[in-house]
Image: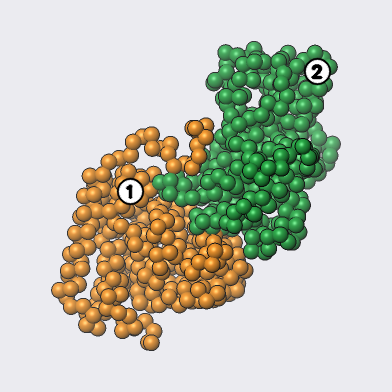
Amino acid sequence: MDKDKLTNHSPEMLSTLFRRMTLVRQFELRAIEERRRGLIPGFIHSCVGQEATAVGACAALSQEDAITSTHRGHGHLLGKGGDPKFMMAELAGRSTGYCLGRGGSLHIADFDLGILGANGIVGGGFPVAVGAGLAFQMRGEPSVALAFFGDGAINEGSFHEAANLAGLWNLPVIFFCENNLYGEGTPQDMQTPIADLALRAEGYGFPGTIVDGNDVIAVYESVLSARSRAMSGNGPTLIEAKTYRFRGHYEGDPQVYRRPGELELWKARDPVPAFRARMLEANICDEAELDEIETSVQAQLDEAVAFAAASPVPAVEEALEGVYADTHRGLVF
Amino acid sequence: MREISYSEAIREAMCEEMRRDPNVYLMGEDVAVFGGVWGVSEGMLDEFGPDRVRDTPISEAAIIGAGLGSAMKGMRPIVEIMFGDFLMCAGDQIVNQVAKARFMSGGKARVPLTIRVTSGAPGSAAAQHSQSPESWFMNVPGLKIAVPATPADAKGLLKSAVRGTDPVLFFEHKMLYSESGPVPEDTDFTVPFGKAAIVQAGSDMTVIGVNVMVKKALEAAEILAGEGISVEVVDPRTLVPLDRATLIQSVAKTSRVVIAHEAHRRSGPAAEIAAVLAEEAIEFLDGPIMRVGARNVPIPYSPVLENYVLPGTEDIVNAVRMLI
């Protein structure tokens, strides 16, 4: 098998990868528009430009595998099988959303899909992913936990603690870093003294690899490999995917911190059209088939927005629900 | 009924729950080989093995977060934090993750996590090893807080915590570990959350005591009985949920109340209890709600200073005399 070659994989898988990347791209652009229009009240932290990491990594996981996601998690959620209808409804704060409107973008979770939750705290998910890996190991379940995070999060103490514990106990955990060169509004080289974050893995007793985060096949294969390691009892892996976000930390971010010329350079390597071109070149799909995928994704998003807009807002009493399993007849409030 | 120590009662609770349910496991610093720095988990490694009784690195955030993650995936973890002061090393995991996971996910996350932690001053342990942090977490919706004062309550509440499906901060006062008391042997004996106990009935004064102050309240009651003052001692047993009805009922009977805890006076548990009583029992009160707590300074090291700062039996007696 030639590394990162399309021909390693079935046309169905490749088509799925393209469809999902298109879905993530279109979802983000649509969510941004709907925020502007007022359907979505909360902040959007879009992952435009990072479709290959989200989709490629999740495609290598089974439904039973668990992920912890981040504040920039729409791609992870869709990649893991999230339904754009329920995601859009959650962003719109409706009771039909994944979290019944109580969490919003930052907290989308679905345990049937193995999504333990996006997170509003940078670095908040590491220990939780390690805990999921611990449960898999203790129960003898053939699953892995994958923690998504960015180049900013790697400097949170929680990374250190979680990586150390995962390495020590040889847990089936994949630490997947989307290094998009910015932690909020500050460049990566002004937050970390080293450029290649994968180097940190060695300090925890497990391997670190670097992958081109804009090559969905490379990402997919790196996670397949890390998953296989974990499943054979060989413990964690740190994957550092080099990528770039095309939009601000949040929608509305004036982005005064972006280095000149950088965005243009990375847009030339936009992962979605790049993969589209590769699919054509390798005769996996023809133009008509790719157009059809794009059109059907648009339709899916139209449906999602319509669903969200038509969904009811929660009854106010629901604010008191789902805090505890047992409220002791309301005494906890 | 046989009498065992608070520490043994806690161990019994853990062992019984671990025998009953294979998903229950214990992890924390020095809990396995050492048997817990307070000796609470002695012998458990031998009975349950290293998979279910785990020594961790010194990593409170990872301990608590891994507890959360494993709970979400079907386990029923008991995690131990050696000193309540160290909860702050895991602040984000407790406050932003554990407490809120269920709510933020629309009620879907399952968090049957019990966080056992020591509370209180063991004597000359100084400022970072002596705190009673219960009230810091009372302000965080999503957590439940237990403060057992007796071996029976320690066992019963811990079993309830482990069997329940909500995250619990289970505070064990260090100075209560060696105290003995009657404890039922029934392996299904549990104590419900949200149910205070009338430790001793009385008619002139209600003294509400939190964990170690229950004992001191009883000592104060004996002194005051000699002065013809009949003190009713009430133990809330859990701070969240708080059994308001029992506290209000006691105040309705006596019309005077002192609330005592070892935590610092400012915004300690008594502040919340006092506000509840002021809102819901004002018509029964014949005087101000008195609070007894540690002075608002870090707990000092030298015994003479520490004793000056920490609340004692005398402080309860004085507060009662001021009210009479």
- Label 2's element? helix
Q: Chain of mark 1?
A: A
Residue at (51% x, 73% y) in the render: A230
Residue at (52% x, 76% y) in the render: A232
For this view, does A140 lie left or right of residue B230?
Answer: left
- Tell which chain the image draws in green: B
**Disc 1 residue crowd, few under 14, some 14–19, many 20+, Cα 10 Å:** many
- Label 1's element? loop
Where is residue B174, by image quadrant? top right
Instruction: Please tell me whether residue A94 is drawn above or below residue B72 in the rendered image.
Output: above
Q: Residue furthest left?
A: A288
Residue at (22% x, 44% y) in the render: A310
Q: Position of residue B156 (x, y in %)?
A: 66, 40
Q: Position of residue A212 (x, y in %)?
A: 39, 76
Where is residue B184, by image quadrant? top right
Of the pair A51 and A329, the residue shown nearer to us: A329
What colour is chain A?
orange
The residue that label 2 is drawn on is B225
Residue A97's tag is 1
Instruction: Please tell me whether residue A129 is drawn above or below residue A307 in the rendered image.
Output: below
Q: Which three-letter amino acid code belongs to the residue tagged 2? A: Ala
